[in-house]
Image (cartoon, rainbow, N blue to C red):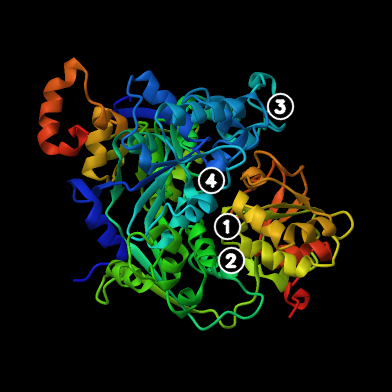
Amino acid sequence: MQPFTQINGLVIPLNRPNVDTDAIIPKQYLKSIHRTGFGENLFDDWRYVDPGEPYMDHTKRRINPDFVLNQERYSNGEILLAQENYGCGSSREHAVWAMVNFGIRVVIAPSFADIFYGNTLNNGLLAITLPPEIIDQLFAEVEAAPGYRLQVDLTEKTITTPTGREIKFVIEEYRRHRLLNGLDDIGMTLLHAAEIRAYEATRRCQAPWLFDAR
Amino acid sequence: MGKTIAEKIFAAHLKDQPSPENMVLNLDVVMCHEITTPIAIMDLVEKGMDQVFDPTKIKAVIDHVTPAKDSKTAMQGKIMRDWAKRHNIKDFFDIGENGVCHALFPEKGFVRPGYTVIMGDSHTCTHGAFGAFAAGVGTTDLEVGIYKGVCSFRAPKTMKIVLEGSLAQGVTAKDVILAIIKKITVNGATDKIIEFVGPVVDKMTMAARMTLCNMAVEAGGTCGICLPDRVTAEYLWPFIQGEFATIDDAVSEYTKWHSDPDAAYEQVITIDVSSLTPQVTHGFKPDQVKDVTELAGSPIDQVYIGSCTNGRIEDLRDAASILKGKKLAPGVRGIVTPATPLIYSQALEEGIIKIFMDAGFCVLNPTCGACLGMSSGVLAEGEVCASTTNRNFNGRMGKGGMVHLMSPFSAAAAAVAGTIVDPRPYLNK
């Protein structure tokens, strides 16, 4: 898993509440047995006009020009600005894989659904919660200014707007540690490579359950 | 300060607490199905870590798309089948024995009061009906569960919902949970466990409690939970009679899990259900709920009766009580999928399958199927389905399709009327 320290990224505004994981990655793509290859089907039903199936060449499908992901000004965006209860519904981790595969590194919203929030941590996707009034202000700024970027710094727990305004965010220390070090649950459980043995020795004291012989 | 049932379960299973907010719990049951598990299996194999922590604690089923509909879903099934064989997972349910996980595993007695359960499926919250902590997780957490038998959770916070009064005829647990979600919204229980208590819950069957807990996640809840009592012990008796001399002994043992009177709750909501009428969703969010009378007359194309919410024998009996001697309205398609083979065979013995068939329904094998729009009854663009399932998200049962969630009574009445309709005049009293 890729460690996260800081990025300066273009912001994609997805201004609708309760975006569910069915919408993030529709059911027909759940037949895959791999964690990769979901990026071009992120928000498939909104992004394309015609119905999609996994075997299609998605570059040949008709796109919905009104959807943000298809707008030139947001291309190569890495920060998704979203609304409340983002990621509700199905537990499918495919939703997070689709976002990460697409190139999203940070998602900012007033609130996240529980299972989705857990899944972001296991894939190095930084999920930041901010009060609704700050989110609404960010939406206004993004929509008003093409090329709007945010500097997100996990070390300092800050977001900096193009005008230099600094917004502090809160994140559990445990999550921050894991994201900074690129440790998903498996990484936490399966630390075994030679080059990280020293780290493992420390963790053995801190978290003995990870190393139990069964 | 006393503890809630969830706090007691967490304390009894605590393996580690890497930070005050995070609790790593030992797991009693790790449930697996063919949509989210194969990726975990492939990952473990690739890492050279193809092991399971305890094959007796892993329960696996092929249920989402079964029989396989194409080569991709066939491969998902094959990966599960080969894995179960390789690791000697005895409780693996394949074609002929398989059913919707959250209906099948309870009827096998796999979930007991005080248990911790995970599955790569959001409706795992259903199993809280047994007084267990049961939560849906992603594939990575599932993978760790399979490999090590542990899972990390945030320290539990509980919302208590007290259900008072008594349910009128034709009003069910489904109507209660829809009314609750309407009240607290789709975000109302996010990060919280919903503890359902009160005289209404005490009187509910296990099937009804499972319906109630099943939709906790639609309000954002991590888990729904009911206090284990005599109803729980009686349901589980065939599986626990070796452990207890009498049902009374089991009931008294299970009482230890009950929340203490001075336990702390994030929120307590009291609802009197006596005046509740049948509820139905509109729109594309599970909290968009109205009294059925407000939507009466809205046309439908399909009726779907089944799923982990309402595919149990009690649900089929409710629907059949309305459908007996009646026909589907012209132009309306009916699909019923008993949630497990046991339910199917009970329905056959009770003549319920014949009632459905005589009414013009298509009777499907047990599967999740059309509930998530993967197979067996997907909607076309512009079509409307009256459904006993749990999600009405835009496109859930097929791109451009619309789902109205309702009880089996309401779905059966809609099948006969051809529109959404108040089921109460259709009840055979």
> Mark 4 and mark 2 in contact (Cβ < 8 Å)?
no
- According to the picture, the residue beneath numbered tag 3 turns out to be A62
Question: Mark 2, residues whose alpha carbon is within 10 Å: few (<14), some, or many (≥20)?
Answer: many
Is residue B3 found left or right of B357 in the rendered image? left
Q: Earlier in the sequence, mark 4 or mark 3?
A: 4
Hey, which quadrant is residue B169 in on the image?
Answer: bottom right
Residue A121 visible in the snapshot? yes
Residue A140 location, x and y as percent?
A: 48, 45
Alpha-carbon span between mark 1 and mark 3: 37 Å
Residue at 69% across / 24% down in the picture? A61
Check the residue under mark 1 and report the chain it is in: B
Question: Mark 1, residues whose alpha carbon is within 10 Å: few (<14), some, or many (≥20)?
Answer: many
Kind of residue indicated by mark 4: Asp
Is residue B298 found left or right of A128 in the rendered image? right
- According to the picture, the residue beneath numbered tag 1 turns out to be B309
Kind of residue indicated by mark 2: Lys
Alpha-carbon span between mark 3 and mark 2: 40 Å
Q: Nearer the viewer, mark 4 or mark 1?
A: 1
Kind of residue indicated by mark 1: Thr
The vertical placement of B239 against A171, above or below, is below
Q: Quadrant of the C terminus of chain B?
A: bottom right
**Looking at the picture, do discs 1 and 3 lie on one chain?**
no
- According to the picture, the residue beneath numbered tag 2 turns out to be B174
Depth check, front residue: A172 or A189: A189
